[in-house]
Image (spheres, grey):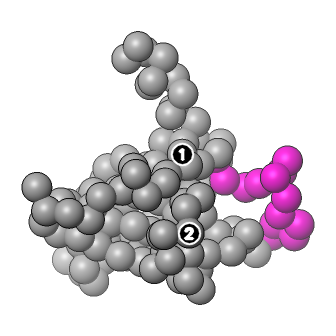
Amino acid sequence: RTVQAARSVRPSVVLVTSKGVRKENSQGSGFVVAFDDSSMDDVDDDPSSNDRSVHILTSAHVAPPGWKVSVTFPNDPGRQHPATVVGRKLNSDLALLCVEAPADVDDVDDDDRPFPPPLVLTAEDVSTDAY
């Protein structure tokens, strides 16, 4: 089961890189995610949510406040895409990033997306309750 689960999420795994002001840097992994539930209104209403953008779920410590964050996708390992931190929850060490499609990608459709396939999350997958 573990190997099967790893294989199923592998295409959605990305590299997140952050650079600080004093030549500090940080790297970690993240997942391309999508939200299919209307109860996720705070994310769905985000202006960055459109067909030309994608969300990345990563660790908050990988994307510290004030640092420049970029994402490298497995289908384009030589290119870093600038990312914006959309939200951060420090007590659970989670950050949600947004990456816009590159300007040189004209038509974005389901068959030719510049991003890997997302892991689809529902409200049941995401809890805001304290543990």
Q: How many marks?
A: 2
The question of residue 31 being in magenta is answered with no
Residue toward you, 11 or 39: 39
Residue 111 lies, with reference to residue 82, above or below; the image says above
Which residue is label 2 attached to? 38
The quarter of the displayed image where residue 108 is located: bottom right
Q: Nearer the viewer, mark 2 or mark 1?
A: 2
Q: Is residue 21 visible?
A: yes
Disc ID at residue 17: none
Q: Whole-percent x and y of residue 34?
A: 56, 57
Label 1's element?
Answer: strand
What residue range appears in magenta? 104-116
Q: Quadrant of residue 106?
A: bottom right
Q: Is residue 15 left or right of residue 46?
A: left
Where is residue 23? Give x, y as percent. Answer: 24, 71
At a point 64% along the width and 46% down the height, the residue shown is 116
Whole-number angstrom distance, CA of label 2 to CA of label 1:
16 Å
For label 2, the crowd category at 10 Å Cα-Cα, with few meaning under 14, some 14 to 19 and many 20 or more, is few
Residue, x 54% and y 27% (percent of image)? 8
Q: Quick check: 4 above or below 74?
A: above
In what quadrant of the picture does the N terminus appear? top left
**Residue placed farthest to the right in the image?**
107
Q: Magenta region's main secondary structure?
A: loop
